[in-house]
Amino acid sequence: PPSLHAEELSMTDFVLGTVCTVRLMEGGSKATLDEAFSRLRTIEDRMSANRDDSDISQVNVMAGKKPVKVSEDTFYVISKALEYARLTNGAFDPSVGPLVKLWNIGSGDEKVPPTEKIMAAKALVDWRQIVLDTTTRTVFLKKPGMALDLGAIAKGYAADEIEKILLNHKVKSAVIDLGGNVFVFGSKKDKSSWRIGIQNPESERGEYLGIVSAGQMTVVTSGVYERYFIENGKRYHHIMSTQTGFPVDNDLISVSIVSKSSIDADALSTALFVLGIEKGMEFLKQFPDTYAIFIDKDHNVYLSPGAGKVFTLQDKSYRYAEKCYC
Ligand code: ADP
Ligand code: MG
């Protein structure tokens, strides 16, 4: 059950596959928190790939058979995901479901699947085979066996939806933390900047390698350190290359995005991770007021243009890369 910490008006619960906390710092009430968490559960009920009755599961079951009508929430998130698929030429692809299911990273008894199975799953990943009909609000996956997975974007959408609730409830200051996707809302009582830590990918949770400091914003990180397994000394994590069918293997350990929009930050953190530093930096140019911080396995830190205005490196074992994109 959700736990309510009355003294500071915050609530924590396990939703969307992760620990979510909303902390009200000025304005709002318990009703605000109740509404926020009920919204989170609705989004999970609609978009989870692991619940039989979710929109996503129903679309997946009907793959190759017929279109399925979905909620407005789900339709919007799929449309957004498709936009990113188009823009990244499929590096970001919400039809990655068959690969996610096959690898099953985070389940506890993972091993590298047989090559034939990887190839078969990869052949089913193709965003061009997703058909959206705006008039009927239906989603159709053209090939049997195809499957949607919104794991790379749903949490971002959820944070933006909580933002709307906070606005409605006239909250002045709050922190939303959806499993490390952080959204700081409004301004702090003392008017100082918000500070969001970027986790050190190689140490315990809560140790920061740097700090992002700004006004209202969201910081979303995609990394290899949250969900992975190791086989024969090699790390297999949960961000998939739709090209190879294997986890992306490009020396990156994390990509953090700073933005005003959490759905974009979430999609971008995954997309830029897949694209890598060079293509990712180029791609980001079309998003104004959005910054990226890439970390590679040799502890180099790469900042996108302008990111230096908000990011400060703190951990001495990391350094700015020689090549500068700023
Ligand atoms: P997290 O969920 O850990 O915060 P991400 O936002 O980066 O991290 O999302 C990773 C999830 O996105 C995976 O668990 C999977 O569900 C999905 N995914 C994996 N590879 C891709 C990809 N190439 N395109 C779109 N979604 C992906
Ligand atoms: Mg993401």
Image: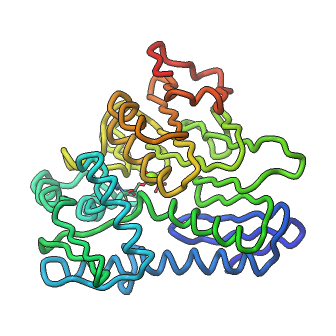
In this view of the protein, can residue 246 be seen by the observer? no
Vertical relation: 10 (above or below) 2: above
Quadrant of the rendering where the N terminus is positioned: bottom right
Q: Residue at x 57, y 74 (%)?
A: 40
- The reply, left or right, for residue 144 in relation to residue 10 is left
Q: Nearer the viewer, residue 112 or 267?
A: 267
Give the residue at x 21% y 82%: 67
Residue appearing at x 21%, y 49% in the figure: 245
Which quadrant of the view contains residue 14? bottom right
Instruction: Identify the colour scheme used.
Output: rainbow
Please give left or right for residue 312 compared with residue 287 in the image: right
Front position in the image: 123 or 112: 123
Where is 17 relative to 210, above or below? below
Q: For the view shown, which residue lies furthest in the front direction? A: 135
Q: Residue at x 30, y 60 (%)?
A: 82
Quarter of the image holding residue 165?
Answer: bottom right
Q: How many marks?
A: 0
- Residue 223 vertical placement versus 136 (above, below): above
Q: Nearer the viewer, residue 274 or 120?
A: 274
- Report x, y in % for residue 139: 26, 77
Q: Position of residue 87 (x, y in %)?
A: 29, 48
Q: Position of residue 114 (x, y in %)?
A: 15, 54
Q: Is residue 120 visible?
A: yes
Tell me where residue 88 appears, x and y as whole percent.
Answer: 29, 45
